[in-house]
Image: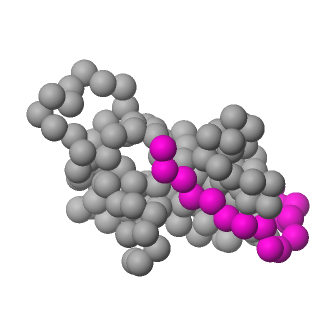
């Protein structure tokens, strides 16, 4: 699993969106992806969850002063061989509440959702954390 995490150095914000509106922002992040990248996505499900579980945070080695904004779980495209068939889709999870706590308004949430989705999609394409930091 690959993650997008941040260290909290700013106070929690209290701006919240209804779940359906947040899901729409996630859908927009997918739809506004350049076509050349959309065509490369294979066998991928994108979901919204409120918060990462304590178990996920523990598995990812995320301490109390950090949080998880998104998570990719699957087999990156570059690691798939010809025998990669009849498998469940890879999954990107976008965590709503941690993103909302970082953002002051809907525009900031929209940008953060876009950033987190693209980061996790980079893992789907086979990019490492180091690769993603360099772009």
Lateral position of residue 28 relative to residue 8, left or right: left
Q: Position of residue 135 (x, y in %)?
A: 40, 77
Q: Which residues are magenta?
A: 1-16
Q: Position of residue 73 (x, y in %)?
A: 46, 40
Assess whether residue 69 is covered by the magenta stretch: no
Which residue reaches farthest left? 82
Assess whether residue 5 is covered by the magenta stretch: yes
Q: Position of residue 41 (x, y in %)?
A: 29, 48
Which residue reaches farthest top? 86
- Determine the residue positioned at 72% across, 67% down: 7
Q: Main secondary structure of the magenta part?
A: loop
Give the quadrant of residue 5: bottom right
2 up-or-down from 5: above or below: above
Lateral position of residue 70 relative to residue 63, left or right: left
Q: Is residue 29 visible?
A: no
Q: Is residue 80 visible?
A: yes
- Determine the residue positioned at 68% across, 71% down: 108
114 up-or-down from 52: above or below: below
- Determine the residue positioned at 36% across, 25% down: 88
- Determine the residue positioned at 87% across, 70% down: 11
């Amino acid at each position: 699993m690959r993650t997008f995490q941040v260290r909290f150095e700013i106070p929690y914000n209290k701006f919240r969106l209804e779940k359906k509106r947040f899901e729409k922002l996630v859908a927009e992040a997918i739809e506004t992806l350049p076509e050349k990248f959309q065509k490369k996505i294979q066998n991928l499900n994108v979901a919204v969850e409120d918060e990462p579980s304590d178990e996920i945070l523990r598995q990812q080695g995320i301490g109390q002063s950090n949080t998880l904004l998104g998570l990719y779980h699957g087999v990156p495209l570059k690691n798939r061989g010809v025998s990669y068939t009849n498998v469940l889709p890879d999954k990107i999870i976008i965590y709503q509440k941690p993103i909302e706590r970082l953002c002051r308004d809907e525009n900031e949430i929209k940008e953060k959702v876009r950033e987190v989705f693209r980061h996790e999609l980079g893992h789907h394409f086979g990019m490492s954390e180091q690769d993603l930091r360099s772009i």
